[in-house]
Image (spheres, rainbow, N blue to C red):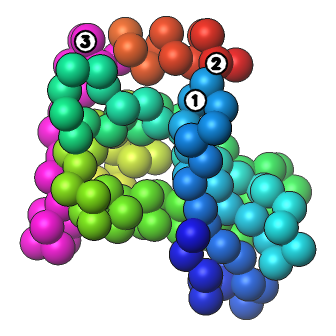
Amino acid sequence: MTEGLFDTTGAPVTVGIDVTGPISAYTVKLADGSPVGRADFVDAPGADGVRIFFHTEVDQEFGGRGLAGLLVREALADSVRKNLTVVPVCPLFARHLKRHGDEFVASGGVFRRATPADIALATRAARNGA
């Protein structure tokens, strides 16, 4: 869990990882522990070290506080620490890497475009895990 983070209002938040459900996710929580957002992913079976991010969502009442961007940045930083290849199916992750991909790579990150198989895996996970 990453502590010492703040949203754009200055409110403290934490980002952690939840691998207990059918879909794994990085989650952002308020100081009281209430979850308010998540970045869903699946790890590609048989492709060691490939993490496919396919959906990011923040509760509507907390929109505009920079939480989705915080989730993306923390998930990518964790992917670097774990030597994972990131596959951005989620438009938010794809847009972030389009803008900041060089910085991500310079920090040790690796990413690649999604293949049809990656998209199919993410679609199955979303259908079966929801």
Q: Quadrant of residue 116?
A: top left
The span picked out in magenta is 100-119
Residue 116 badge: 3
Q: Which residue is label 1 attached to?
A: 23
Q: Quadrant of residue 87?
A: top left
- Mark toward the start of the polypeptide (3 vs 1): 1
Label 2 with label 3: CB-CB less than 8 Å:
no
Amino acid found under the numbered disc labelled 1: Ile
x and y, in percent, of residue 78 in the image: 37, 63
Q: Quadrant of residue 99?
A: bottom left
Mark 1 surroundings within 10 Å by alpha-carbon count, few (fewer than 14), some (14 through 19), many (20 or more): some
Report the residue at 42% width, 66% height from top: 73
- Mark toward the start of the polypeptide (2 vs 1): 1
Label 2 with label 1: CB-CB less than 8 Å:
yes
Q: Is residue 90 left or right of residue 102?
A: right
Q: CA distance from mark 3 to mark 1?
A: 19 Å
Q: Which residue is label 2 attached to?
A: 129
Q: Is residue 59 left or right of residue 42?
A: right
- Mark toward the start of the polypeptide (2 vs 3): 3
Say whether residue 10 is visible. yes
Q: Is residue 56 above or below residue 97?
A: above
Amino acid found under the numbered disc labelled 2: Gly
Q: Secondary structure at mark 2?
A: helix
Q: CA distance from mark 2 to mark 1?
A: 6 Å
Q: CA distance from mark 2 to mark 3?
A: 20 Å
